[in-house]
Image (spheres, rainbow, N blue to C red):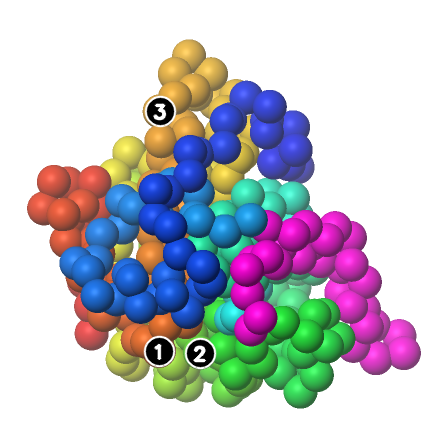
């Protein structure tokens, strides 16, 4: 299992953005008044982050979910972005991403679910978590805006997220990090998704994931997809020890790939949180598409 903790010492945290704002509302106004640019999200956001590790969130007398919570310190109320790992991984593999999101004015939460699946069943647990936070945000933290929950899933975790969205859980939308599809029910669940979804994929010429094409094919609308050139599946986690070992002769290239993933994730989550659509994120990808960092871009 790859854990972010193991390589955190080797991947320095990005420098902070020069943007100076007082709170997430001011940041939102600032960003929406300017030309969208995914590159700005490569930097750490303007806000400090409060970390709460290994929370046990009760869903019923016999079921709880363990999570790490990263709160935007400047926020009275802010959206919550819930990040779910894939096969063989854990919340540790997405800790940096959740913290990065919090620095940009959104609370981030990385959750642990059974990392061998079954993934549709994991989706049912995740749906219960979303419903619980939507009804009672104080279950996690009173500073969560319960009407603005965004779901993120990596690999088979994307199957779980798709199941949640397909069943109509109260979420604004989803971001799927190099998704992998599994389960005969998945196409039907995808067809029922009515909220915006952004698919951010690795380079399929290097690392094709299982049934990734199903997500764009079967989601009926408000879905966009990009691939990030010269990246592999594990780059959708950050930092990732396994990827670092695989590319140990050129670790800087590995860090570059993972920061590109986290910047695209942050742009997508911000777009959903601030506008309820993918337009801001899609427009922010324009330069990256033109210079070949992003490719195979499509949207419907």
Which residue position is annotated with label 2? 172
Sequence-earlier tag: 1 or 2: 2
Q: Quadrant of residue 274?
A: bottom left
Which residue position is annotated with label 3? 253
| Residue 227 at x, y percent in the picture | 27, 49
Sequence-earlier tag: 3 or 2: 2
Helix, strand or loop at mark 1? loop
Packing grade of label 3 (10 A; few <14, some 14-19, many >=20) is: some
Q: Label 3 vs label 2: CA separation?
A: 33 Å
Taking the image as shown, residue 252 lies to the left or right of residue 71, namely: left
Helix, strand or loop at mark 2? loop
Which residue position is annotated with label 1? 276
Q: Label 3 vs label 1: CA separation?
A: 33 Å
Which quadrant of the figure contains the C terminus?
A: bottom left
Taking the image as shown, residue 24 lies to the left or right of residue 41, namely: right
| Residue drawn 76% across the image and 65% down it | 65
| Residue 197 at x, y percent in the picture | 36, 70
| Residue 284 at x, y percent in the picture | 21, 56
Packing grade of label 1 (10 A; few <14, some 14-19, many >=20) is: some
Above or below, comparing residue 81 to residue 167 in the picture: above
> Which range of residues does the magenta coloring cover?
49-77
Q: In which quarter of the image is residue 240?
A: top right
Taking the image as shown, residue 76 lies to the left or right of residue 105, namely: right
């Amino acid at each position: 299992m790859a854990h972010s903790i193991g390589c955190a010492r080797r991947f320095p945290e990005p420098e902070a953005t020069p943007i100076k704002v007082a709170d997430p509302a001011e940041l939102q106004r600032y960003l929406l008044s300017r030309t969208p640019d995914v590159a700005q999200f490569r930097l750490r956001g303007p806000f400090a982050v409060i970390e709460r590790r290994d929370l046990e969130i009760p869903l019923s007398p016999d079921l709880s979910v363990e999570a790490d919570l990263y709160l935007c310190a400047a926020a009275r109320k802010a959206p919550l972005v819930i990040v779910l790992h894939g096969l063989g991984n854990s919340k540790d593999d997405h800790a940096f991403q959740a913290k990065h999101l919090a620095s940009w004015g959104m609370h981030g939460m990385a959750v642990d679910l059974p990392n061998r699946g079954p993934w549709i069943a994991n989706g049912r647990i995740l749906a219960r978590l979303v419903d619980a936070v939507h009804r009672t945000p104080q279950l996690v933290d009173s500073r969560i805006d319960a009407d603005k929950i965004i779901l993120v899933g990596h690999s088979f975790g994307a199957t779980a997220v798709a199941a949640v969205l397909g069943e109509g859980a109260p979420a604004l939308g989803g971001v799927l990090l190099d998704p992998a599809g599994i389960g005969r029910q998945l196409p039907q669940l995808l067809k029922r998704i009515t909220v915006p979804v952004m698919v951010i994929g690795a380079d399929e010429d290097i690392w094709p994931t299982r049934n990734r094409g199903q997500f764009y094919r079967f989601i009926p609308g408000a879905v966009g997809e990009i691939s990030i050139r010269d990246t592999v599946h594990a780059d959708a986690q950050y930092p990732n020890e396994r990827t670092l070992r695989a590319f140990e002769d050129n670790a800087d290239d590995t860090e570059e790939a993972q920061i590109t993933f986290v910047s695209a994730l942050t742009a997508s989550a911000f777009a959903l949180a601030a506008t309820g659509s993918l337009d801001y994120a899609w427009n922010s990808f324009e330069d990256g598409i033109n210079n070949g960092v992003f490719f195979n871009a499509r949207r419907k």
